[in-house]
Amino acid sequence: MNAYLEPLPRLPEAGEDPADLLPLAGGPLVFDRVVPARRDGAAARREPPRALSRVEAGGRAFLHELSRPRPGIAGLDWSRPRIMAILNVTPDSFSDGGDRFDEEQAIAAGLTLAREGADIVDVGGESTRPRSDPVSEAEELRRVLPVVQALVAAGVRVSIDTRRAAVIEAAAAAGAVLINDVTALRFEPRSLAAAAATGLPVVLMHMQGEPKTMQEAPHYDDVVLDVFDFLQTRVEACEAAGIPRARVLVDPGIGFGKTVRHNLELLRRLALLHGLGCPLLVGLSRKGFIGRLSAGEPPKERLAGTLAGCLAAVARGAQMLRVHDVRELKQALAVWTAIA
């Protein structure tokens, strides 16, 4: 039987005794209650919230992972929520396909995103939207390498959004400082080894199925626990391949093989994923569930919903947010942080 603890994070209140609280992933959020969950095979059961003093001895290791500070990654610490800007050098991405497919347009856009406040610019050359078709390795390299090289030369911190080992290697050689893989380094047999050899940190994302078919009736026994278990397995695979946990971020994969209900449940119970002991990245920018929760707006009209989702994620301890609209999110985070 597997056991989990979902913290109920909040801001500390004046006059509270720090001895009664634990920081969530090192702070600034804290928690003094958790929701235990257990599963035996597919069956999962959540229990009523309980105080930290009532957590069983077997849960102390989980509490340690929930609370310990996370080391910095790719030159970034977690003193504030970080912004990862999306730069799709593709003709067919769900939101901005074709907007930055031209090399010069892509470079100019990346520079603008950095000026607007992006902590890192995530360059991708293959759409992984629902029902998308893969591109060849050669075409992906043709799309992304000149952009990565130009942005690095301009002093921009760059991550590479890819699932191919050869693209990982080429982007790392060009100066990328982070690997972001929607397949959690499973797409090719040598992906893990290639990532490990670069010495770079990695983002491991959960996705059920493949982009072509992932939205065809996705099913989970308990979406949060299923995602946790998958990511735990991938973190352990990274450790076995020579990528220490200190160089791993995890991403629950909002919109990747998930219904609206699945996405909402993941965001609502997001804090449980801190039990993996890794910084938490959330990418929900302009996703389809936002349109389905509102008036069916097209992707570029989903800014308000994106900001609402991002702030909800930050309130549950998300440390990095992957978005299209950097300037707007930076403003929203400035206000949220000042209030907090």
Image (spheres, rainbow, N blue to C red):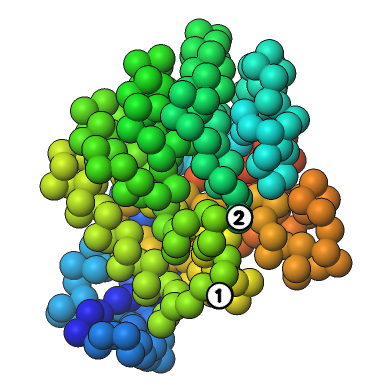
Residue receiving disc 1: 217
- Vertical placement of 173 versus 196: above or below? above
Query: In the rendered picture of this protein, how many numbered marks are placed on residues?
Result: 2
Q: On the picture, is 114 further left or further right than 58?
A: right
**Which residue is painted at 86% across and 67% down in the image?**
295
In percent of width and height, residue 198 lies at 26, 26
The percent coordinates of residue 256 (x first, y second) are: 53, 59
339 lies left or right of 59: right
Q: Could you tell me residue 250's position as x and y percent?
A: 38, 52
User: Which is nearer the eye, 16 or 279?
Assistant: 279
Q: Which residue is mark 2?
A: 131
Q: Amino acid at mark 2?
A: Arg
Q: Secondary structure at mark 2?
A: loop
* Amino acid type, residue under disc 1 in the picture: Ala
Q: Residue furthest top?
A: 153
Name the quadrant of the C terminus.
bottom right
Q: Picture quarter containing residue 215? A: bottom right
Residue at image position (19%, 84%) is: 1
For label 1, the crowd category at 10 Å Cα-Cα, with few meaning under 14, some 14 to 19 and many 20 or more, is few
Most foreground residue, 260 or 338:
260
In terms of depth relative to the viewer, which is nearer, 184 or 44? 184
